[in-house]
């Protein structure tokens, strides 16, 4: 085995090990999902480009609470706390989805004529 071939072989092994290591990391407690236990995103309402109202659920079991948060680029403020509701409120259409729905309706009307 030549020294160049050995170096190339090790390079291939290291490059192949990167996706395997990332896959394993995602499925272990060290991964990013471990920190979100007891925290669940319920709903979000965009107000402007940098402001939104977000509802999150914290805790588990009988100790769950919903927090209504005002989120800006510089701060997060608790606006209200409440008991968890049976179901999350339906998502409000954003201007983008409302425009897309309008465009699809107009296109269907144009095809029908």
Image (cartoon, rainbow, N blue to C red):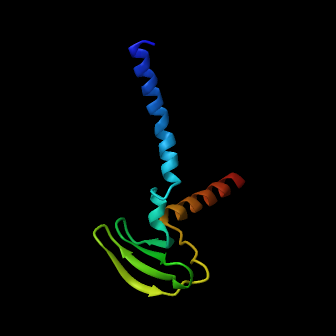
Q: Nearer the viewer, residue 28 or 106?
A: 28
Report the side of 78 relative to 87 (left or right).
Answer: left
Give the residue at x 54% y 84%. 84
Counting the numbered discs, the total is 0
Taking the view exactly as shown, the residue that stands out farthest to the top is 2
Residue 111, compared with residue 53, is above or below; it is: above
Q: Residue 14: x and y, percent?
A: 44, 32
Can residue 113 be seen by looking at this rendering? no
Report the side of 113 relative to 16 (left or right).
Answer: right
Give the residue at x 52% y 87%. 83
Image quadrant holding the N terminus, namely: top left
Q: Residue 29: x and y, percent?
A: 48, 59
Residue 57, compared with residue 102, is above or below; it is: below
Taking the view exactly as shown, the residue that stands out farthest to the left is 74
Report the side of 39 relative to 51 (left or right).
Answer: right
Q: Residue 7: x and y, percent?
A: 40, 21
Image quadrant holding the C terminus, namely: bottom right
Q: Which of 36 and 46 is in front in this view?
A: 36
Give the residue at x 46% y 72%. 45
Residue 72, compared with residue 97, is above or below; it is: below
Q: Residue 25: x and y, percent?
A: 48, 50
């Amino acid at each position: 085995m030549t020294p160049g071939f050995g170096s190339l072989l090790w390079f291939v092994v290291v490059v192949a090990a990167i996706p395997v290591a990332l896959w394993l990391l995602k499925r272990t407690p060290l991964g990013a999902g471990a920190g979100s236990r007891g925290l669940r995103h319920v709903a979000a309402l965009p107000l402007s480009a940098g402001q939104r109202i977000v509802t999150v659920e914290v805790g588990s079991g009988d100790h769950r609470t919903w927090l209504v948060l005002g989120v800006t680029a510089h701060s997060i403020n608790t606006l209200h706390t409440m008991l968890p509701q049976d179901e999350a409120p339906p998502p409000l259409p954003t201007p983008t989805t409302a425009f897309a729905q309008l465009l699809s309706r107009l296109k269907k009307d144009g095809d029908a004529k």
